[in-house]
Amino acid sequence: MVLKGQVALITGASSGIGRATAESMARAGARVGVNYLKNQKRRGGGGGSHPQGGGEAAAIRADVTRQADVRALVAAVRKQWGRIDILVNNAGDLIARRTLADMTEEYWDQIMDLNLKSVFLCTQAVWEEMAARHSGCIINVSSIAGRNAEAPAPQPMRPQRAAYWPTPEGWPRNSLRTEFASMGLRRG
């Protein structure tokens, strides 16, 4: 993977897939905005340079479920590197394991805000810039558990995971594909 000179923004990059993606992109020469919220000690690709590939990374704290924070996050990456070429919507979590009987509307809203609304807010914040250049890539990361209600999980979580699948992966994949293709953008 050669990403020299590309600017990437990765949400939820303090651990797991987000962290590995941030580190890999920086090693491949990209300049990476590493988003985190709570996990300050493990801020993904962290900060500084990655001499092997010539890339660099900067950790930026933001709550991607809040539009003002997303705008500030995007503005920070643009201020540092001038643009965003790649958006990786990786932030997501189950938050807590609850049975259907224990789920509240507030809990449901938290799940939807983190796993779906954040994708909408971040995509909305960068797409016009990419469209104006006729260049850019938006990658939406989702869990296989959300795709397969039979995946290993406590029985009460299976309906929740099945309900979650059509939204984060389906909405951006299907409805934005045609709109973005006409602008020279691609979905990863």
Image (cartoon, helix red, strand yellow):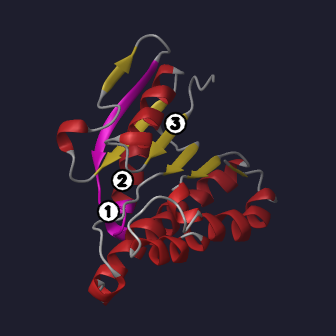
* Residue highlighted by disc 3: 7
Reply above or below: 69 against 74: below
Q: Say which element carries label 3.
A: strand
- Is residue 33 visible to us here? yes
Mark 1 touches mark 2? (CB < 8 Å): yes
Q: Is residue 115 magenta?
A: no
Tell me where residue 148 appears, x and y as whole percent. 58, 64
For residue 133, the mark is none
Residue type, label 1: Asp
* Residue highlighted by disc 2: 73
The magenta stretch is: 55-70
* Residue highlighted by disc 1: 69
Instruction: For marks 1 and 2, give the CA distance.
Output: 6 Å
Residue at 36% x, 81% y is: 108
Q: Is residue 62 magenta?
A: yes
- Among the two numbered marks 3 and 1 on one chain, the one whose residue lies closer to the N terminus: 3
